[in-house]
């Protein structure tokens, strides 16, 4: 599996630093713990800096989630070559790279699930998440089509849902998650009866 850097986790500038700190706060204590003061403590900045960049708590939370979506989309795009010249191995490795993006920082994975619930009340954020899903699904469906899968878009959505389910399980049972994920991706791909390109 490729070792991908996570640019979004290494922020440039105070605004991005505040957004990463907000995600960390959400992932460790939930959305209710987000205050300008708490985020400033995590980020190591003055409270006034948080207020300067984000007038309201809601704006801070929304922008932190949008920042996260942008980072995850960058991860999907970073493995796009594996989807453009697909083999069973490259598709599996790309999916593992996407799923493993935050394995070393589970608070970000927890923040992602808080984000999904929050998006149910925030149409603008829901659109951003939908675009991220469409990016993954479109690239994956294209690869599956090359590999001879019937109904590649449905198959891509099924695999996306599988990844989501395993990510949730990892929060409760982290031991052996990567091995389970690889096995379940293999099982899903077996069921799709892939044909390697000639």
Image: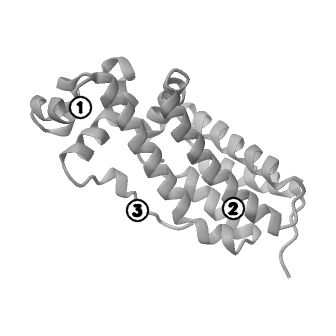
Q: Position of residue 87 (x, y in %)?
A: 75, 72
Q: Identify which residue is drawn at 66% across, 36% down.
A: 165
Q: Position of residue 70 (x, y in %)?
A: 44, 49
Q: Identify which residue is drawn at 56% across, 30% down.
A: 172
Q: Can you tell which of label 3 and label 1 is closer to the viewer?
A: 1
Residue at image mark 2? 92
Query: First in sequence: mark 3 or mark 1?
Result: 3
Query: First in sequence: mark 3 or mark 2?
Result: 3
Quarter of the rendering containing residue 28: top left
Give the secondary structure at mark 1. Answer: loop
Measure the C-alpha gap from mark 3 to mark 2.
19 Å
Q: Can you tell which of label 1 and label 2 is closer to the viewer?
A: 1
Residue at image mark 1? 54
Q: Does the image show residue 143?
A: yes
Residue at image mark 3? 5
Residue 90 circle label? none
Quarter of the rendering containing residue 116: top right
Q: Does the image show residue 34?
A: no
Give the secondary structure at mark 2. Answer: helix
* Direction from residue 60 to residue 99 in the image, left or right: right
Categorize mark 3 by other alpha carbons within 10 Å: few (<14), some (14-19), many (20+): few
Name the quadrant of the N terminus. bottom right
Query: First in sequence: mark 1 or mark 2?
Result: 1
Measure the C-alpha gap from mark 1 to mark 2.
40 Å
Give the secondary structure at mark 3. Answer: loop
Q: Position of residue 177 (x, y in %)?
A: 60, 45
């Amino acid at each position: 599996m490729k070792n991908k850097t996570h640019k979004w986790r290494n922020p440039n500038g105070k605004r991005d630093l505040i957004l990463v700190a907000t995600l960390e706060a959400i992932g460790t204590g939930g959305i209710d713990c987000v205050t300008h003061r708490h985020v400033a403590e995590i980020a190591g900045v003055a409270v006034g800096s948080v207020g300067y960049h984000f007038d309201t708590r809601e704006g801070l939370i929304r922008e932190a989630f949008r920042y996260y979506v942008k980072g995850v989309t960058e991860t999907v795009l970073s493995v796009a070559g594996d989807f453009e010249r697909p083999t069973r191995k490259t598709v599996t490795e790309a999916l593992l790279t996407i799923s493993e993006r935050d394995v070393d920082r589970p608070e970000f994975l927890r923040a992602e699930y808080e984000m999904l619930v929050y998006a149910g009340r925030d149409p603008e954020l829901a659109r951003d998440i939908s675009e991220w899903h469409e990016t993954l699904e479109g690239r994956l469906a294209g690869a599956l089509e090359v590999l001879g899968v019937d109904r590649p878009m449905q198959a891509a959505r099924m695999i996306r849902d599988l990844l989501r389910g395993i990510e949730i399980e990892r929060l409760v049972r982290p031991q052996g998650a990567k091995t389970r994920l690889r096995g379940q991706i293999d099982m899903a791909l077996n069921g799709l009866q892939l044909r390697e390109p000639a």
